[in-house]
Image: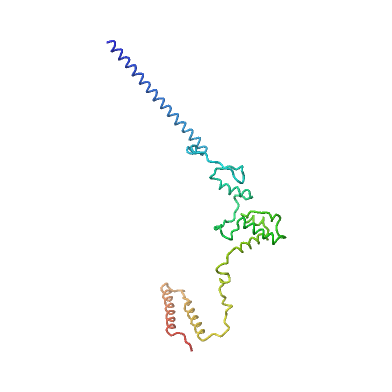
Amino acid sequence: MENSVCYCFCGGLKQSKMSVSVEDRRKYLMDLEEYINKSKQQLSSILNSLNWSHDSLMEEEPKMVSCPLNPEHRMPQRSLDRHLKKCSLRQEGYQSDEEFLTASEFPSSSTVLGPEKFQEALFKATSSHVDNLAPGSTEPRPPPRTSARLLTDFSPSERNALHEDVISRTSRPLITAEELQLPSFNDNKQSRPKSKLELLAEQRDAKRRRVTHKKVHTSRKTHTEVLREVIRNQMEYIQSQDSETKSGPSTE
């Protein structure tokens, strides 16, 4: 009897300890989950203020390279080409808001003056117009990127030499400007007297113009009367043209 009572008491005590242990662990897990959620919210708030994202933190740091024009400039490898264009413009003294000359759609064309062709054209200018060149004209200079730089850094003789060089490289057009000119009727007037046939043709054309441009008086007329008169004039013109076609011009 005593053994059975002791067994029941010990079993109940053990069960009470197990239930308390499970509740404590459940409470601990809930507190831990609440702490994790609060930490996530704080981290998201910090990232949003910096315009960052969780994915950006997990990305591998991009490889940084130095600018060939200025070693102090460092940027990611993917941004090097875009940086070189801006950096080269700044080194040549240009501003980003300037209006640049339009690039050629056909870089391989013979009329496009690249750096080598540009220097060759300037060398021709220095050899033929030495007296009219600006100071420092014999030094190598990059091609101008704006019209203002072309006017300020290059003398009229140099600009003329560049123009002549481009014209010499241009292929001859298929049709010249002289071939496009229309003949002047005043220059080709015939001095001979007109024939009888030509005079009759002029009279016929004049009669047609008179019939075609015959005026229709619309004062104090109804819309129906105006239309009736227009139709009558057109019929008269058609009849006169038909009769002339049947009879034909006289050759007497």
Q: Give me the residue at 43% from left, 27% from top.
A: 32
Q: Position of residue 16 (x, y in %)?
A: 35, 18
Q: Position of residue 22 (x, y in %)?
A: 37, 23
User: Is residue 155 found left or right of 77 in the rendered image?
Assistant: right
Q: Give me the residue at 60% from left, 52% from top.
A: 98
Which residue appears farthest toward the bottom when viewing the image?
A: 252
Q: Is residue 2 above or below residue 155?
A: above
User: Is residue 116 found left or right of 203 in the rendered image?
Assistant: right
Q: Position of residue 92 (x, y in %)?
A: 63, 50
**Color encoding of the figure:** rainbow
Which residue appears farthest toward the right when viewing the image?
A: 131
User: Is residue 148 found left or right of 250 in the rendered image?
Assistant: right
Foreground of the two, 211 or 141? 141
Which residue appears farthest toward the left when viewing the image?
A: 1
Q: Is residue 100 above or below residue 225?
A: above
Q: Is residue 170 above or below residue 59?
A: below
Foreground of the two, 219 or 192? 192
Which residue appears farthest toward the top when viewing the image?
A: 2
Q: Quadrant of residue 244?
A: bottom left
User: Is residue 55 found left or right of 69 in the rendered image?
Assistant: left
Q: Is residue 251 above or below residue 21?
A: below
Count of picture labels: 0
Image quarter where the N terminus lies is: top left
Q: Quadrant of residue 168?
A: bottom right
